[in-house]
Amino acid sequence: MRPGGVTIHGLDGIPEVVPGDDLAGFILEAADRGEVGLRDGDVVVVTHKVVAKAEGRIVDLRSIEPSAVASQFASEWSKDARQVDLVLREARRIVRMTRGILIAETRHGFVCANAGVDASNVPGEGMVCLLPEDPDRSAQQLREEIARRRNVDVAVVVSDTFGRPWRLGLVNVAIGVAGMDPIADYRGETDPSGYTLAITRMAVADELAGAAELVMGKVDKRPVAIVRGYEYRPAREGGSSGRDLLMDPAMDLFR
Amino acid sequence: MRPGGVTIHGLDGIPEVVPGDDLAGFILEAADRGEVGLRDGDVVVVTHKVVAKAEGRIVDLRSIEPSAVASQFASEWSKDARQVDLVLREARRIVRMTRGILIAETRHGFVCANAGVDASNVPGEGMVCLLPEDPDRSAQQLREEIARRRNVDVAVVVSDTFGRPWRLGLVNVAIGVAGMDPIADYRGETDPSGYTLAITRMAVADELAGAAELVMGKVDKRPVAIVRGYEYRPAREGGSSGRDLLMDPAMDLFR
């Protein structure tokens, strides 16, 4: 931690994003307007929703012809069969499909409700948003664009809102990461009592995503936050990735 | 969010806590010394470890006579049988007990590794720390002591470090809460696109705990952080609780 602590600024005034928009430009303008700017070492947390919109990952449900299984589940639980079908298409594994709830593993490996298919904060009747195709690439592109235009070295986290087993309520987590190690690995370090930490790896990119959510809100149109003063560890050799936050299936007791 | 964003200050200089210590006093002194102070509306995030130490929730493993099942599991996985036994005593339900890993539901209802029994940051060979008996009560007592001595109205979150299914790495979450609603409930609100949010409840106390971890670290002896500028919702009528963050077992797809 640097002197003065860690500060989280939500950026106001980012317009509704449409496919092809210059999201990096929107972020830089909003950061200037909010007198926050961008500095070396900042973490720019961006909701996947604006990233996906800029990348054109919007689907018109009218284009979907639902499968029999989607129609069956939808009619049983009063859901939109086309949206259920889209979830099944986005999934590579269904973890739970019961009581109207669909929890799926996305092709990236994230386990979340509806494989990330979501209708909130998407303008237009029947329009839904998918996850970015490659959230790490999205994060890296934003990081490079920001470096190119302003000559600042920032980390970028692309966030989404996930539920968790056993705990009520959703939290923001990281699905794409660039410019930092999403894990702070304390294994082998010694705590003040002389105890060697054997297993402690902190998912700091998830904590950054959650911290950013505190200033974003869900109805406030504030999809970007700047976290300043957090001393992240640099990206690992060979590149860090949001997928570093995925449990190895062989180690996963809840698969 | 208030103007200036949300700031997280880690408090330096909190001494090693022993049973009977005045933790509220330590927090107030450290906040003064760090020129942070405490203001109305702050959230004081405290690791459960210092709370548990102040409350005397330390066990000397030499006092434990392990059961047969604990000895069996410990010998198979090179663990301390006495510590395994203590975990089983602290649990009201075993969720997984395999590969040397013990995931249990505590008597409070939290599902976590080792039912919260932990040897890190506990001085003394063979000494381990339990969770506070009632983390909400601990939070409420700190809140009241701070109000009594300084006439400020703060929320208090008692945090612990939990793993999650499917995701690698640990994050801090809230196990005790006082003075705020740990959930921001958006159900029924309308997003900027006119979509009514049907299920969105954000576990903001968990996000606050995770945000605080960013300034705490695991080896830095910084067990308290002040989150300033986050506009939490007041505690609900009848009292808010860290248990509000527990999934109703009847709704839990992963029980």
Image (cartoon, coloured by chain):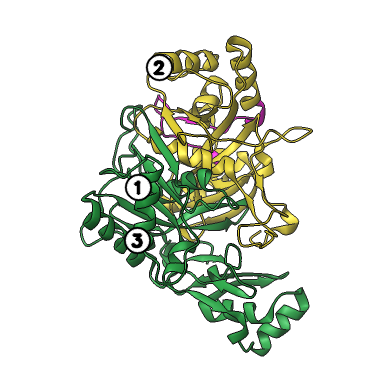
Chain colours: A yellow, B green
Q: Is residue B170 above or below residue A179?
A: below
Residue drawn at the location 24% of the way across and 56% of the way down: B149
Specify the subunit that label 2 lies on: A
Decide whether residue B232 is among the magenta residues: no
Q: Which residues are magenta?
A: A116-137
At label 3, counting other C-alpha atoms closer than 10 Å, the crowd grade (few under 14, some 14-19, many 20 or more) is many
Residue B112 lies in quadrant: bottom right
**Three-letter code, disc 3:** Ala
- Could you tell me which quadrant the N terminus of chain A lies in? top right
Closest to the observer, B172 or A173: B172
Q: Nearer the viewer, residue A247 or B188?
A: A247
Decide which of A120, A126 is in the foreground and name it. A120
Percent coordinates x, y for residue B19 in the rendering: 44, 72
Magenta run includes residue A131? yes
Query: Is residue B118 visible in the rendered structure shown here?
Result: yes
Mark 1 and mark 3: Cα distance apart in space: 11 Å
**Cβ atoms at labels 1 and 3 below 8 Å apart:** no
Between discs 1 and 3, the one toward the N terminus:
1
Secondary structure under the numbered disc 1 in the rendered image: strand
Alpha carbon of mark 2 to alpha carbon of mark 3: how far? 36 Å
Magenta span: predominant SS is loop
Q: Is residue B202 visible?
A: no
Residue on which disc 2 sits: A35
Instruction: Read off the residue under disc 3.
Output: B139
Question: Label 3: chain?
Answer: B
**Quick one: SS at disc 3?**
helix
Foreground residue, A180 or B244?
A180
Q: Which SS class for mark 2?
A: loop
Kindly identify which residue carries mark 1. B43
Q: Is residue A96 left or right of residue A248?
A: left
Residue A231 position by quadrant: top right
